[in-house]
């Protein structure tokens, strides 16, 4: 973060004031903690915080946080509204409120809570309202960096003009929260073993949950059992925004069991994310590719998902940039549309169930109502070692298309059931142009790299 001279002097003055007052509050809290029969936490009203006060209480709030953390006590806030901002959380901060009733509104500062290098920080049962105040660039309403054992649980966060929660180099858990009317709900950068679970995200202006790294590497974040709905794309672009879950350059991430509904672009978009697992998610009402593994990744498993309504169900792509090695298995994909959102490449496929390019197994998927094609293999010369077996395609334009352009590699198409393909069951393509008749009937023998057997067409 950049400071100008004036803000630095103000910050030093505030810190001096807080330091002078802290011993008094520390003595009060320590005494309360020692008294027999007292709760393990400290009532915030006993140390100067007043619910429903009209004024900004940031200084009193900071003194209470510092003193409670120093004493190893939980700071307990009662019901009501508290106005505060630019609060710093030291190690062992624990703040809890009455779920649905303890309301902290941003006041007098560009962000609400920050911590750098703090461990064992816990926030629970609180409502954080960013009041749509513009946040500093690259900052979240709640901004935690370089800490471990973080816990943000059962809170509600609303009206953040940037990320509601931004984490940098953090280990811990964000679970059971409700986040709405924010630009981005949760932005995790360079995670050190994060679990993002059981959250409800609604009405995101640009993205839902982001798991990114500043450079490619192991991350291991778990994004599991979240409910993500109504993610818009206010900033435009061709896929940078409008995603329910986006994993970028972060390896070994698991995205599992999420319910995703109505996203302008993708339900789950993996970009240069190796060993990504996208499994057991239910995704409806997507504007572009529902489940994506793109650009320079090596290794993806996309399995046992439901996709109902998208321009494309699954895309495993960008062999030209090193994207390769995947399993696409057991997915149910239906009701696709023949167009992508404005801003995307007009050459990109739409109305396709599954599209793949390199070193990929496609098996045991069910695809229904794909206007263009059930399964597409390859893009011109960008096709290598693909196996398409045991799938069911119903009601498509083309059942399966395979690139037979010069330079295209080996493809196995076997034991698939193709029903009601209006334009042909299995068709050879050169880029976007069909160049063969129905290879399920005749003609496959002239392509040495293409092996067809056991397919049932009706």
Image (cartoon, helix red, strand yellow):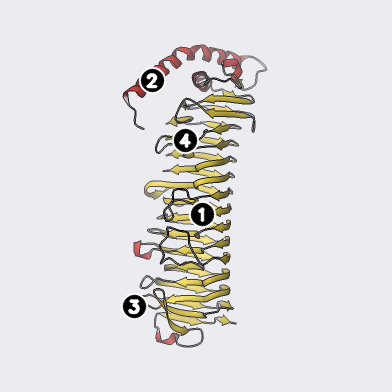
Determine which of the numbered discs, if any, sits on residue 10 in the image: 2
Query: 312 or 134: which is nearer to us?
Result: 134
Q: Residues within 10 Å of mark 1 (few under 14, many from 20)?
A: many
Residue that carries the numbered disc 3 in the rendered image: 406
Query: 265 or 73: which is nearer to us?
Result: 265
Looking at the image, residue 146 lies above or below residue 255: above
Residues under numbered marks 1 and 2 in contact, where contact means CB atoms less than 8 Å apart: no
Residue 192 visible in the current orientation: no
Mark-to-mark CA distance, 3 and 1:
36 Å
Determine which of the numbered discs, if any, sits on residue 15 in the image: none
Residue at 46% across / 47% down in the picture?
211
Which residue is situated farthest in the right direction here? 37
Looking at the image, residue 220 lies above or below residue 129: below
For marks 1 and 2, give the one nearer the viewer.
1
Tell me the SS state at disc 2. helix
Tell me the SS state at disc 4. loop
Mark-to-mark CA distance, 4 and 2:
29 Å
Residues under numbered marks 4 and 2 in contact, where contact means CB atoms less than 8 Å apart: no
Residue 129 visible in the current orientation: yes
Residue at 44% across / 48% down in the picture?
235
Residue that carries the numbered disc 1 in the rendered image: 264
Mark-to-mark CA distance, 1 and 2:
42 Å
Q: Earlier in the sequence, mark 4 or mark 2?
A: 2
For marks 3 and 1, give the one nearer the viewer.
1
Which residue is situated farthest in the left direction here? 5
């Amino acid at each position: 973060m950049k400071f100008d001279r004036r803000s630095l002097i103000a910050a030093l003055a505030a810190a001096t004031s807080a330091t002078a007052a802290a011993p008094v509050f520390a003595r009060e809290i320590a005494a309360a903690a020692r008294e027999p029969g007292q709760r393990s936490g400290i009532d915030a009203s006993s140390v100067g915080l007043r619910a429903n006060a009209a004024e900004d209480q940031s200084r009193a709030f900071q003194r209470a946080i510092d003193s409670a953390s120093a004493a190893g006590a939980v700071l307990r806030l009662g019901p009501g509204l508290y106005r505060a901002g630019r609060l710093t959380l030291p190690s062992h901060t624990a703040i809890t409120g009455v779920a649905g009733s303890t309301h902290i509104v941003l006041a007098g500062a560009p962000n609400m809570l920050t911590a750098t290098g703090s461990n064992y920080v816990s926030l629970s049962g609180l409502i954080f309202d960013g009041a749509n105040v513009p946040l500093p660039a690259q900052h979240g309403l709640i901004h935690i960096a370089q800490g471990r054992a973080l816990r943000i649980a059962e809170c509600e966060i609303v009206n953040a003009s940037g990320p509601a929660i931004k984490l940098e180099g953090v280990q811990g858990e964000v679970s059971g929260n409700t986040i709405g009317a924010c630009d981005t709900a949760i932005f995790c950068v360079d995670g050190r073993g994060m679990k993002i679970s059981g959250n409800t995200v609604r009405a995101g202006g640009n993205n839902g949950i982001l798991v990114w790294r500043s450079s490619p590497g192991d991350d291991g974040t778990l994004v599991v059992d979240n409910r993500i709905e109504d993610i818009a794309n206010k900033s435009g672009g061709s896929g940078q925004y409008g995603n329910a879950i986006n994993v970028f350059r972060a390896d070994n991430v698991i995205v599992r069991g999420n319910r995703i509904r109505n996203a302008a672009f993708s339900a789950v978009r993996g970009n240069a994310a190796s060993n990504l697992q996208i499994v057991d998610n239910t995704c409806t009402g997507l504007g572009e590719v529902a489940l994506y593994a793109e650009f320079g990744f090596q290794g993806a498993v996309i399995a046992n998902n439901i996709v109902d309504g998208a321009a494309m169900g699954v895309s495993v792509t960008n062999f030209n940039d090193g994207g390769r090695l995947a399993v696409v298995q057991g997915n149910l994909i239906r009701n696709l549309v023949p167009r992508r959102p404005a801003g995307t490449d007009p050459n990109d496929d739409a109305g396709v169930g599954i599209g793949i390019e390199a070193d990929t197994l496609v098996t045991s998927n069910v695809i229904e109502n794909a206007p263009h094609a059930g399964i597409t293999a390859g893009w011109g010369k960008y096709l290598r070692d693909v196996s398409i077996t045991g799938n069911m395609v119903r009601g498509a334009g083309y059942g399966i298309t395979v690139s037979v352009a010069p330079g295209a590699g080996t493809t196995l198409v076997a034991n698939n059931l193709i029903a009601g393909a209006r334009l042909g069951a299995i068709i050879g393509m050169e880029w976007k142009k069909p160049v063969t008749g129905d290879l399920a009937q005749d003609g496959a023998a002239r392509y040495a790299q293409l092996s067809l057997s056991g397919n049932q067409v009706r």
